[in-house]
Image (tube, rainbow, N blue to C red):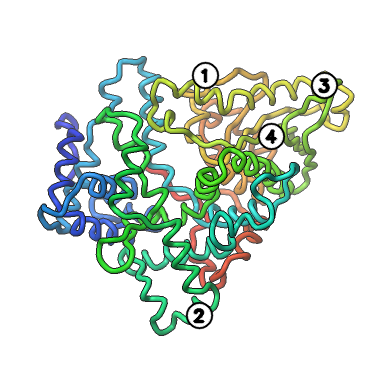
């Protein structure tokens, strides 16, 4: 079931009609069961015809929840496979865009990476980072929202228990064909679970943060729409990211896409929960913690001196957030607690302005700091001016193709090499043990092709130590002993 070159692509309306042919109460459990079967890392590569990707399953579930009704036919595994096959053959806007070839390619890559690669972040790092950053890192400014008691006020329990509940729901979905049944907390053997987290807490937190129903899902789905363009529909926000469990489709709660459950307890999931409750003040608090957290990660680098931002001049101007000095180079690190917006995911007309708004200032700050160091300015006397200078922009979430030639020219030019990397890439970089990181960065920058790839590519094939900061975060959660070694700690392979 593959699309041969030259064959007609599937129209979105035909795909939607095919999904709507079946009752949601028949189709959604099939989707959830398939998602549970191919839930870990890139196990979808072993699925029939490689069609059972999490992004395809998520969209089929979204269409069924948003558009389906119960006055339709039953569904079987063959029906689901046909739906997923149609999804893989959907018309692509790239075929109809009349930009230059490079710009059209860049827009396609933005949409495809946003669609696929968000499902490929390492779960261990995502969950461990939540505690490591939010409860084990001290910011430099007075918090407005993240003060004493914020966890209970926002989450309804401690962060440790919140993540533990997400782990429990996820484990249940994987082992129970995509379901979590509250009655299981009263079954024999559940005493050990409820001794760690009371059943009332598990259920109240699940109901408040993880569970929705068809009516609420449809309302959020409609409110989140940014375009009526049929070719862009599948790239829009899927409300299952905000509430990955649904009620009303058999016993207990159904997880149409089990991979979205741990994402709810990641820093990004908590960010959206916090902003919905506290507004922009929560985002500012989180940004301060994120900057400090990046510093904690940088201090894991062996044989490196890590300096915080330097204040200079009569106006008390600031350098980049962190300056790392190694034998091979000086690394200027600017921290941006940003994530790709819907304009980037859709690759619409505002995408360039959005990218500049979020990252443009970071390039300028790195270049200006490099110039201050080279000029021998007094405040920077502790930073050597006798070695190469590189810039690193660390973002809270990945900007997957930002270093590539299709996107880099849209950002400010610099006199020193600058790479954008996600926090997960930095967490991996600082643990390399078989080569100096400075040398790796120099070799990467000297290669005209590799320097346009994601930083993760330069880290492959190297020996890594444990990341002590992440391990401390993970050790603060329930079930850590039972889960040890069972959660992927390395990034999954990419589909692009």
Question: Residue at point 26% right, 24% down?
Answer: 95
> Residues at badges 2 and 1 in contact (C-beta under 8 Å)?
no
Q: Residue at x 16, y 48 (%)?
A: 82
Position in image of residue 287 (x %, y %)? 64, 40
Q: How many marks?
A: 4
| For marks 1 and 4 on the same chain, the one whose residue lies earlier in the sequence | 4
Residue, far bottom = 188
Task: Give residue 192's mark.
Answer: 2
Which circle's residue, 3 or 1, is located before the other in the chain?
A: 3
What whole-number distance in Å separates the C-alpha atoms at marks 4 and 3?
22 Å
Dividing the picture into quadrants, the one containing residue 76 is: bottom left
Given contact means CB atoms under 8 Å apart, are the residues at marks 4 and 3 in contact? Answer: no
- Of 384 and 382, which appears nearest the observer? 382
Asked if 344 appears above or below 127 in the picture, the reply is above
Q: Which residue is mark 4?
A: 333
Would residue 313 be visible to someone looking at this image?
yes
Q: Give the number of the disc on residue 315.
A: 3
Residue 110 in percent (x, y) is at 41, 31
Circle 3: is it few (<14), some (14-19), or many (20+) Cα within 10 Å?
Answer: few
Task: Choose the circle earlier in sequence order: 2 or 1.
Answer: 2
């Amino acid at each position: 079931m593959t699309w041969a070159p030259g064959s007609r692509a599937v129209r979105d309306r035909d795909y939607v009609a095919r999904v709507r042919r079946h009752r949601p109460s028949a189709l959604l459990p099939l989707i959830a069961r398939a998602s549970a079967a191919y839930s870990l890392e890139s196990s979808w590569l072993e699925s029939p015809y490689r069609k059972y990707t999490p992004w395809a399953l998520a969209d089929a579930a979204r269409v069924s929840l948003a558009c389906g009704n119960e006055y339709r036919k039953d569904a079987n595994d063959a029906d689901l496979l046909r739906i997923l096959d149609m999804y893989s053959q959907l018309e692509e806007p790239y075929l109809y865009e009349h930009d230059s070839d490079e710009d059209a390619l860049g827009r396609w890559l933005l949409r495809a990476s946003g669609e696929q690669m968000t499902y490929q972040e390492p779960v261990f790092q995502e969950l461990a980072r939540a505690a490591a950053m939010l409860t084990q890192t001290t910011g430099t400014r007075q918090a407005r929202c993240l003060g004493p008691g914020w966890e209970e006020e926002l989450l309804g329990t401690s962060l440790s228990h919140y993540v533990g509940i997400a782990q429990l729901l996820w484990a249940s979905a994987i082992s129970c064909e995509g379901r979590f049944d509250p009655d299981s907390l009263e079954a024999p053997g559940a005493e050990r679970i409820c001794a760690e987290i009371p059943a009332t807490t598990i259920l109240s937190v699940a109901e408040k943060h993880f569970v929705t129903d068809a009516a609420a899902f449809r309302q959020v789905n409609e409110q989140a729409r940014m375009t009526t363009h049929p070719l862009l529909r599948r790239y829009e926000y899927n409300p299952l990211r905000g509430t990955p469990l649904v009620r009303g489709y058999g016993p207990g709660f159904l997880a149409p896409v089990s991979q979205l459950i741990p994402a709810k307890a990641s820093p990004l999931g908590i960010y959206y929960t916090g902003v919905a409750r506290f507004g922009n003040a929560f985002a500012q608090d989180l940004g301060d913690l994120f900057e400090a957290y990046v510093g904690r990660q940088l201090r894991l680098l062996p044989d490196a001196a890590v300096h915080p931002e330097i204040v200079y001049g009569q106006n008390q101007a600031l350098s980049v957030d962190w300056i790392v000095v190694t034998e091979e180079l000086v690394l200027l690190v600017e921290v941006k607690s940003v994530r790709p917006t819907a304009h980037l995911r859709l690759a619409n007309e505002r995408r360039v302005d959005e990218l500049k708004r979020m990252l443009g200032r970071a390039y300028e700050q790195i270049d200006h700091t490099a110039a201050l160091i080279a000029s021998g300015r007094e405040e920077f006397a502790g930073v050597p001016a006798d070695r190469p200078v590189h810039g690193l922009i660390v973002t809270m979430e990945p900007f997957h193709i930002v270093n590539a030639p299709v996107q880099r020219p849209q950002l400010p030019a610099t006199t020193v090499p600058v790479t954008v990397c996600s926090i997960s890439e930095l967490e991996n970089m600082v643990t390399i043990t078989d080569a100096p990181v400075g040398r790796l960065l120099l070799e990467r920058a000297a290669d005209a092709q590799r320097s346009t790839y994601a930083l993760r590519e330069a880290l492959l094939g190297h020996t890594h130590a444990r990341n002590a900061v992440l391990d401390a975060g993970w050790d603060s959660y329930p079930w850590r002993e039972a889960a040890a070694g069972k959660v992927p700690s390395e990034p999954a392979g990419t589909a692009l």
